[in-house]
Image (cartoon, grey):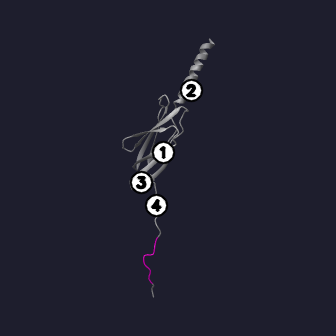
Amino acid sequence: MIDWLDDIDRGVLALTQWLRRLRPPGNILIHRKRQIDMSQFGITFSLPEASAADVTTQELTVTWGSEAATTTTYDATATTTDEYIGELPATIATSLVNIDAAGNRSTPAEQSFSEVDDVAPPEPGLVGIAAKRQIA
């Protein structure tokens, strides 16, 4: 009678380990934001660590406002992304999936950012003397 309980216990343990291996990756953070011109901004994201030791790649899908989604694959050891460029204000949605060596895909980690133009203009130059005259 105890043998079948041991089998169930081993099965539950194997299932738990399998589910842990396929857990979604962590959160994506904005690594760097820069203003390219009056309406164009570039954003680089920080990638979380892979969620398991056998993850070989991470697939990031970025949707910037109403633009078409862009999907890029990164090595599992990558810590930052390429620069994504678009107009602000916009809602930027991300979806990150971990993929292991066997091609198994994790549940996507999805999040969105509401980004606005909060990049200050550069410091102005110094004020110079345009004219100088002596008053008697």
Give the crowd class for mark 4: few <14, some 14-19, many >=20 residues within 10 Å: few
Give the crowd class for mark 3: few <14, some 14-19, many >=20 residues within 10 Å: few
| Residue 10 placement: quadrant | top right
Mark on residue 17?
A: 2
Residue at x 52% of width, y 33% of height: 55
Give the crowd class for mark 1: few <14, some 14-19, many >=20 residues within 10 Å: some
**Which residue type does callout 1 highlight?**
Phe
Q: Disc 3 vs disc 1: Cβ atoms closer than 8 Å?
A: no
Does residue 5 sit above or below 130 in this rendering?
A: above
**Which residue type does callout 3 highlight?**
Ile
Q: Which residues are magenta?
A: 127-133
**Which residue type does callout 2 highlight?**
Gln
CA separation in Å, label 4 and label 1? 23 Å
State the image coordinates of residue 99 (x, y, percent, origin top left): 48, 32
Is 132 a magenta residue?
yes
Left or right, 117 with respect to 48, comes to: left
Does residue 131 sit above or below 44 in this rendering?
A: below
Mark on residue 104?
A: none
Dot placed on the residue nearer the N-terminal end, 1 or 2: 2
Left or right, 121 with respect to 9, comes to: left
State the image coordinates of residue 126 (x, y, percent, origin top left): 47, 69
Residue that mark 1 sits on = 45
- From the image, state whether disc 2 or disc 3 is nearer to you: 3
Does residue 10 sit above or below 110 in this rendering?
A: above
Dot placed on the residue nearer the N-terminal end, 2 or 3: 2
**Which residue type does callout 4 highlight?**
Pro
Residue at x 58% of width, y 18% of height: 8
Residue at x 49% of width, y 49% of height: 32
**Closer to the camera in the image, 65 or 49:** 49
Is 51 a magenta residue?
no
